[in-house]
């Protein structure tokens, strides 16, 4: 088969690699029809985010396609259409994944659309429901609302968990877009005062993939018992936090990742996602917002779209 490998210059090369083999008792082999691009892929290509042990060296954290091989008494059979959460390896013609990390395509979804579900919606569900313990009527803040993760967080927080949603965005146009998918309040990172916005709308739960110096002042705006969840530090790894706030307000500052969790943990997260979110997908209450679909041989351009910050929602590669 072919996979989109990374050469010594950090350029993509569509080249022959060995076909994947099912080793575990509950492994499933998929023919990949589409995979989606995530910022973790950009980090992996840059050499700063290696895949977990046992996963392919080429990127790809989520995909959709057709089952080629499956356990005799498993949940899936050859020919079933599924989407899957991966530790890596989605930029390829085939991939092997534990059965528990696969989900049936929501009814009515095409592979190019469903490929944008597993990573961002599992991340959103994990951090809103399991880590953040969000409750109906609470206020939720997402830093970077227009991206694939941001859209998923806004949709779930608003339409599944019944929260008020505040989003920081990169432009007024992106702010209007985020309102169209469920945000109640938006703040333009270049023209608005985010701290003032959060003081007026104190968050109970925040998901922050941005970090940077502004994180500390924003953290200070949280309601009592607030939960600030840090996923990454795209704006920098240093900030100043008044630690007295932790006990005065009973706040929690939580680091969270999905990729490094065990397959068994991921299977439980996906089971919850299927239970709580699949009905809304199938009723078309909301869906992944797909910014652009490109052939996999244009993976370099797909990464460039994210690097330039142009995307609203997901960029997908068709295999």
Image (cartoon, rainbow, N blue to C red):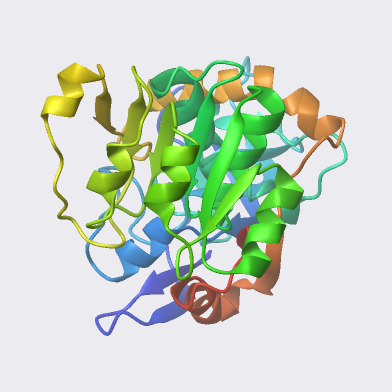
- Please tell me in which quadrant of the rendered image residue 172 appears: bottom right
Quadrant where the image shows the C terminus:
bottom right
- Compared across the picture, whether 210 is left or right of 74 comes to left
Left or right for 83, reference 227: right
User: Which residue is pictured at 60% across the width and 25% down the height?
Assistant: 273
Q: Is residue 26 above or below residue 214?
A: above
Query: Quick one: 93 or 86, which is closer to the camera?
Result: 86
Using the image as rendered, state which of residue 118 and residue 133 is in the foreground: 133
Q: Is residue 86 visible?
A: no
Residue 194 at x, y = what percent?
42, 53
Residue at 26 percent of width and 22 percent of height: 251
Q: Nearer the viewer, residue 208 or 216?
A: 216
- Residue 25 x/y as whole percent: 45, 22
Q: Position of residue 54 (x, y in %)?
A: 30, 43
Report which quarter residue 11 is drawn in.
Answer: bottom left
Image: 153 above or below 315: above
* Front one among 40 and 72: 40
Numbered label tally: 0
Above or below, 25 relative to 67: above
Residue 131: x %, y % from top left: 39, 22
| Above or below for 149 versus 281 | below
Q: Residue at x 26, y 46 (%)?
A: 217
**In the image: residue 294, left or right of residue 93:** right
The structure residue drawn at horizontal position 25% and vertical position 55%, both measured from the top left corner, is: 50
Q: Is residue 80 visible?
A: yes
């Amino acid at each position: 088969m072919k996979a989109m490998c990374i050469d010594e210059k950090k350029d993509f090369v569509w080249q022959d690699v060995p076909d994947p083999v099912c080793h575990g008792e509950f492994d499933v082999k998929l023919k990949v029809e589409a995979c989606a691009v995530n910022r973790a892929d950009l980090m992996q290509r840059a050499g700063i985010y290696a895949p977990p042990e046992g996963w392919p060296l080429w990127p790809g954290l989520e995909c959709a396609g057709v089952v080629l091989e499956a356990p005799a008494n498993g949940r899936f059979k050859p020919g079933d259409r599924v989407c899957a959460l991966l530790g890596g390896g989605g930029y390829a013609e085939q991939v092997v994944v534990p059965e528990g990390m696969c989900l049936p395509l929501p009814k009515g979804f095409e592979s190019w659309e469903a490929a944008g579900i597993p990573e961002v919606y599992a991340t959103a569900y994990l951090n809103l429901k399991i880590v953040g313990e969000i409750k109906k009527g609470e206020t939720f803040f997402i830093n970077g609302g227009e991206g694939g993760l941001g859209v998923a967080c806004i949709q779930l927080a608003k339409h599944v968990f019944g929260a008020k949603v505040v989003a920081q965005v990169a432009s007024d146009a992106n702010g209007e877009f985020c309102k169209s998918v469920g945000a109640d309040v938006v703040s333009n990172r270049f023209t608005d005062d985010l701290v003032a916005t959060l003081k007026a709308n104190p968050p109970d739960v925040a998901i922050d993939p941005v970090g940077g110096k502004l994180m500390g002042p924003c953290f200070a705006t949280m309601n009592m018992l607030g939960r600030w969840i840090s996923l990454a530090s795209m704006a920098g790894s240093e900030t100043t936090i008044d630690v007295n706030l932790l006990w005065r307000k009973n706040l929690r500052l939580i680091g969270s990742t999905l990729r490094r969790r065990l397959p068994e943990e991921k299977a439980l997260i996906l089971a919850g996602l299927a239970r709580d979110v699949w009905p809304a997908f199938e009723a078309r209450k909301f869906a992944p917002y797909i910014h652009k679909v490109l052939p996999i041989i244009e993976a370099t351009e797909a990464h460039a779209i994210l690097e330039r910050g142009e995307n609203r929602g997901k960029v997908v590669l068709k295999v």
